[in-house]
Image: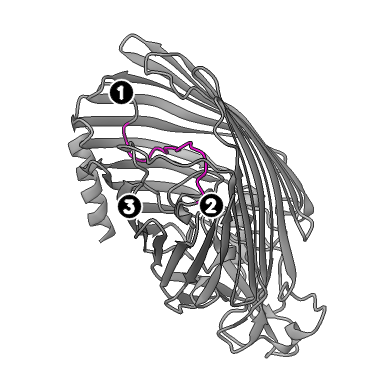
């Protein structure tokens, strides 16, 4: 089956590759479009700075502080690529206002408060503030029958300034977040009595963890430049991360994008440097606690030729990495990209070859899997050696866009997660303990992905997004692609039923995943490297299937007066106590309701 799918994908590339192609601006619908406008507190939640979270709050990525149509929770390592409209026919006129205050409460002892504020229309500057608190102090039932405290707390504060020059946009963004949760999970069996003792130090069961993050971003974009204009854009980021267990990370990035037009083409260069410094982590090379520093230097030169009907881009991506824990290394990947538009703004055919090298830095992994061992050092970065892709995008109607695509990627050192089981006391054969914090093991894998997306945008009435992905994995060493699904899908709908009532629904679906527990019939032999772990005598593999995720959510907002409104959110109303990670069920059906005041 896997071989047939590869043959089918290569057949698609063979059709699109011979097309003669000359350059144009990027017309694929995957590029992001940011709608910059003053905030109107009367619009539905989906058009505000951020949307209300779903039931699985601790598992969601932090929403970006922009005016976006839909938020995108991430349920797995390979996230859904949200399709954005390339152009809109028109935007509705809006009344100016300063902002909105919302407050409410729900079951699972859940208080909520949120503030949106933006400046009135100014000639060249937009200023905005956002703050939010959402927490829960409820209990959850585990598969083994235990009832445990599973509190969480999400706090956010953000400020942005956008200033328009003659042809450029300068953006300054400052944000802060503080997220707290418990290591409340335990897989399959009832919790051993040893772990129920107060102040036990065997594992992290019942302990509190917090992630605190502050960041600053400065970017300059030549927003109105034409395809024949020289442009220089840059983006600077700095983030500071700290956990309650003592880990810290400094992350800095400077990236410049340069475009220099030439006769019938343009030279492109993306270049920059990243610096990542992490402290109080486990160093697998020294087999002890320590720190790590990485310096990434990247350069991505390419040349684009063509016109409005077709374009061809050829280049390369290069990375040079200095790591304080190991030797320096360099990586290189090709860039070949073809676009052909046989019918302008109706259908576009694209294909290409590229790759990517991504840092598995501490905060990235911590937000991806918050229940990982807090001392973790995912010291191997992931190299996507090649990615072959192709597909079609275009318009089904003036306000309805679509995309159909297929990707085939070859990854090296993909981190996968597992739990470890051992005997706490060798003299007591019944004293098996399972750590409820995850460890990392690496494998090389090939991934074939099929994607379908449909996006309809009508500001006055309805917005609709449908997206789905199907995945096929081929592992080099592991039996399964642990914790990765075979498919996922999303449906988001926002509908303005009347001037007073707006309703919406978000449906998230993820296929079943296989989870791994390594079981060792003896006392805990760690710390060990991955190679030494797999060579342990009598090491057993326990495989568990996580049921598919069906997360169904509904929201409604009713405008009582020009100033006051009421809202209600029904989250996970399928009563599905699914698990993103083995042993960690999410809250079942929960309700959040409250009042809003526009000012």
Q: Is residue 425 visible?
A: no
Q: Gap in Å between the C-alphas at discs 1 and 3?
A: 33 Å
Label ID, residue 259? none
Residue that protrudes farthest toward the front in the picture = 561
Q: Is residue 127 left or right of residue 72?
A: right
Question: Tag 3, which secondary structure?
Answer: loop
Is 391 situated left or right of 324 in this image?
A: left
Q: Is residue 53 visible?
A: yes
* Display coloring: one colour
Circle 1 Cα neighbour tier, 10 Å, few/some/many (<14 / 14–19 / ≥20): many
Instruction: Please identify the dominant SS of the magenta region.
Output: loop
Q: Quadrant of residue 5?
A: bottom left
Q: Which residue is mark 2?
A: 50
Q: Is residue 590 above or below residue 47?
A: below
Residue range corresponding to the magenta coloring: 27-41
Q: Nearer the viewer, mark 2 or mark 3?
A: 3
Element marked by disc 1: loop
Q: Position of residue 497 (x, y in %)?
A: 34, 60
Label 2 to label 1: alpha-carbon separation: 34 Å
Residue 33 is a magenta residue: yes
Q: Count neighbours of disc 3 (C-alpha within 10 A) and say few if under 14, some if 14 to 19, many if 20 or more.
A: few
Q: Nearer the viewer, mark 1 or mark 3?
A: 3
Judging by the rendered image, the residue that carries numbered circle 3 is 461
* Disc ID at residue 24: 1
Which callout, 2 or 3, points at the residue further toward the start of the chain?
2
- Give whichever of discs 1 and 3 has the lower sequence position: 1
Where does residue 576 sit, x and y in percent of width and height?
45, 77
Residues at circles 2 and 3 in contact by the CB criterion of under 8 Å: no
């Amino acid at each position: 089956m896997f071989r047939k799918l590869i043959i089918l994908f290569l057949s698609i590339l063979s059709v699109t590759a011979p097309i003669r192609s000359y350059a144009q601006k990027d017309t694929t619908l995957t590029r992001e479009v940011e709608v910059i406008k003053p905030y109107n507190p009367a619009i539905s939640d989906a058009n505000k700075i951020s949307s209300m979270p779903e039931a699985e709050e601790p598992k969601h990525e932090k929403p970006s502080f922009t005016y976006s149509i839909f938020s995108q929770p991430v349920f797995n390592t390979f996230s859904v690529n949200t399709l954005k409209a390339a152009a809109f026919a028109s935007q509705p006129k809006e009344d100016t206002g300063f902002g909105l205050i919302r407050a409410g409460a729900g079951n699972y002892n859940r208080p909520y408060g949120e503030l949106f504020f933006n400046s009135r229309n100014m000639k060249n500057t937009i200023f905005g503030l956002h703050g939010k608190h959402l927490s829960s102090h409820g209990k959850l039932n585990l598969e083994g029958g235990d009832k445990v405290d599973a509190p969480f707390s999400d706090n956010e504060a953000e400020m942005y300034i956008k200033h328009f020059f003659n042809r450029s946009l300068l953006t300054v963004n400052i944000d802060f977040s503080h997220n707290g949760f418990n290591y409340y999970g335990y897989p399959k069996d009832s919790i051993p009595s040893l772990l129920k003792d107060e102040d036990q130090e065997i594992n992290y069961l019942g302990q509190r963890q917090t992630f605190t993050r502050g960041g600053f971003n400065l970017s300059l974009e030549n927003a109105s430049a034409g395809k024949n204009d020289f442009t220089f854009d840059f983006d600077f980021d700095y983030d500071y991360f700290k956990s309650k267990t003592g880990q810290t990370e400094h992350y800095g990035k400077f990236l410049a994008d340069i475009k220099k037009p030439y006769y019938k083409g343009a030279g492109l260069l993306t270049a920059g440097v990243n610096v990542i410094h992490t402290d109080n982590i486990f160093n697998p090379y020294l087999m002890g606690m320590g720190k790590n520093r990485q310096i990434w230097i990247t350069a991505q030169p390419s040349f684009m030729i063509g016109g409005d009907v077709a374009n061809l881009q050829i280049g390369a991506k290069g990375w040079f990495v200095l790591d304080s824990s190991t030797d320096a290394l360099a990586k290189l990947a090709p860039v070949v990209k073809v676009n052909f538009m046989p019918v302008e703004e109706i259908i576009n055919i694209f294909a290409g070859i590229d790759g990517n090298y991504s840092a598995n830095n501490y905060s990235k992994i911590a937000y991806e899997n918050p229940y990982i061992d807090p001392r973790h050092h995912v010291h191997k970065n992931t190299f996507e050696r090649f990615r072959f892709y192709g597909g079609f995008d275009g318009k089904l109607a003036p306000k309805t866009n679509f995309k159909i695509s297929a990707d085939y990627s070859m990854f090296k050192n993909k981190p996968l997660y597992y739990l470890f089981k051992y005997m706490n006391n060798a003299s007591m054969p019944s004293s098996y303990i399972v750590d409820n914090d995850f460890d990392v093991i690496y494998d090389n894998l090939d991934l074939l992905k099929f994607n379908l997306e449909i996006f309809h945008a009508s500001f006055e009435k309805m917005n609709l997004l449908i997206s789905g992905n199907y995945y096929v994995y081929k592992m080099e060493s592991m039996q399964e692609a642990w914790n990765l699904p075979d498919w996922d899908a999303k449906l988001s709908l926002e509908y303005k039923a009347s001037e007073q009532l707006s309703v919406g629904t978000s449906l998230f679906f993820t296929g079943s995943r296989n989870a791994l527990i390594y079981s060792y019939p003896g006392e805990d032999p760690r710390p060990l490297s991955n190679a030494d772990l797999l060579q342990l005598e009598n090491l057993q593999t326990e495989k568990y299937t996580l049921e598919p995720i069906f997360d169904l959510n509904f929201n409604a907002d009713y405008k009582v007066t020009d100033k006051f409104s009421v809202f209600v959110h029904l989250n996970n109303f399928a009563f599905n106590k699914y698990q993103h990670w083995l042993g960690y069920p999410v809250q079942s059906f929960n309700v959040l309701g409250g009042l809003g005041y526009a000012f």
